[in-house]
Amino acid sequence: MGTRPPRITYDPVNEKNTFVSGDLVAGRVALEVAKECQIDSLLIKFKGKAEVLWTERHGQTTVVYHSKDKYFSHKHYFIRGKDVKGTSVVSPGCHVYPFSFQVPDQDMPSSFKGSVGKIVYLLEAKLSRSMRIAKKDSTKINFVTKADFIGDPGLMTPQHDSKDKKMKFFTSGTVAMDVDIEKTGFLQGEGLKVLAHIQNNSSREIKPKYCVYQKHSFFANGKRRVNTKDLIKEVGDPIPPSASEKVTRVITIPHDFEPSIPNCSIIKAEYRLRVSSYSIRPGDWQDEYVCFVLMSLCTICL
C-alpha cells in the first residue's frame, strides 16, 4: 500500500460548525505509513481567499474573466522545517500530528459559493517525497462574519421607497405606493415587517405582492456579472378601486438563508425586498408598480 495521503480532521467550536474571527481552529493530520519511508516534508496550510471566474463568447473569441482576493495564508511544518535540507525517516504505523490556527481578527467576508465565484477558508495538508507526486488532503471550514448592530449603524437604518404610476390602456386613474421597513439588517428566523401605504385611485382592484430575492454580483477585469433569484413570494389582500389602505406584512426569514456579503471587492451578495401592486383579470392585461428596498442578512454567533 505504501504511504497513503494525509487526512485532516478538525474540532467544531459550536453546534453549527461555524467559525468567526479570533476563533481557534484545532485538529489533527493523520499519516498512515505501511513501511519505513523517507519524507521530505509534511505540512498543513490554513488560508482564506475569494475567486471569480467565468468566460464569455464574443464572435470567434472566448474572453476569460478572472479575479482573486487573498485574505491570509499560514503554514505549519510537522516534518522538516521550511529551510532545513534533507529528509526524515518515518516508521510504519499511523502517525497523528496535532495543529492549531487562529482565525485572523480582521474584516473578512463569510464563506460563499455562487455560480461563478466563491469565498473559501481552507485547511490543506501536503506530503512531499522525493521523485514522487505530492499527496494532499483539504477540508473547508465555514466562516461567518459577525453582525455588529452597534458598530455598524447602517444595519439599523430604516429603508423607504415610493412609486406613483398612471394606469395605461383600458384602465384609468393612478396607483401610488409607499413602502417602509424599520431597519436594514436582519437575522435568520427574524420577521421582516413591511409597512405599505397604497392609494388605488384606479378603476381596477389591485393586490400587493411581496418578494424577497437575492442578488449576486461578480467583478473581474472591469466587468460585472449579476445573478438574481426569487426566494420568497407572498400575495396580500385585494384593495378595491378608489381606495387607500395601509397594509402590514410580516415575512419570516428562513433559518437557512446565507448571510449577505458586503465586504468583498470581487463578490457581493445581497438581499432585496420587492413590493409590487398589480391589476389583473382573466384574459386581461397586467400592470405593475414596483418598490425596491435593500436588506442585509446578518449572523450573530454566540
Image: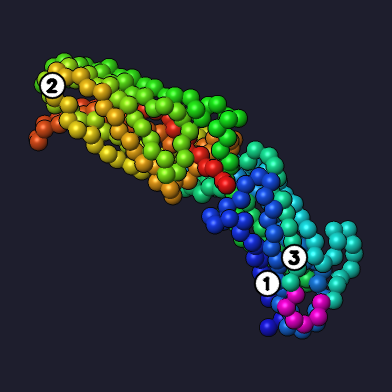
Quadrant of the rendered structure where residue 275 is? top left
**Label whose residue precedes the other's in the sequence (1 or 2):** 1
Could you say where residue 99 lies in the image, as x and y percent from the top left? Answer: 74, 61
Highlighted range, magenta:
90-95
User: How far apart are the two marked residues, 3 and 2, measured between alpha carbons?
Assistant: 71 Å
> In this figure, which residue is indicated by the disc labeled 1?
5
Camera sees residue 193? yes
Question: Which label sits on residue 98?
Answer: 3
Residue 94 magenta: yes
Residue at 24 percent across and 30 percent down: it is 208
Question: Which label sits on residue 301?
Answer: none
Camera sees residue 60? no
Q: Residues within 10 Å of mark 2 (few under 14, many from 20)?
A: some
Residue at 38 percent across and 35 percent down: it is 192
Main SS of the magenta segment?
strand
**Do the residues under discs 3 and 1 have CB atoms within 8 angstroms?**
no
Callout 1: SS: loop
Nearest to the observer: residue 154 or residue 43: 154
Could you say where residue 104 lies in the image, as x and y percent from the top left? Answer: 70, 45
Could you say where residue 247 lies in the image, as x and y percent from the top left? Answer: 26, 27
Q: Residues within 10 Å of mark 1 (few under 14, many from 20)?
A: some
**Do the residues under discs 1 and 2 have CB atoms within 8 angstroms?**
no
Residue 136 magenta: no
**Label whose residue precedes the other's in the sequence (3 or 1):** 1
Residue at 43 percent across and 36 percent down: it is 271
Instruction: Indicate the amino acid at tag 3.
Output: Pro
Question: Which label sits on residue 241?
Answer: 2
Which callout, 3 or 1, points to the residue nearer the camera? Answer: 3
Quadrant of the rendered structure where residue 51 is? top right
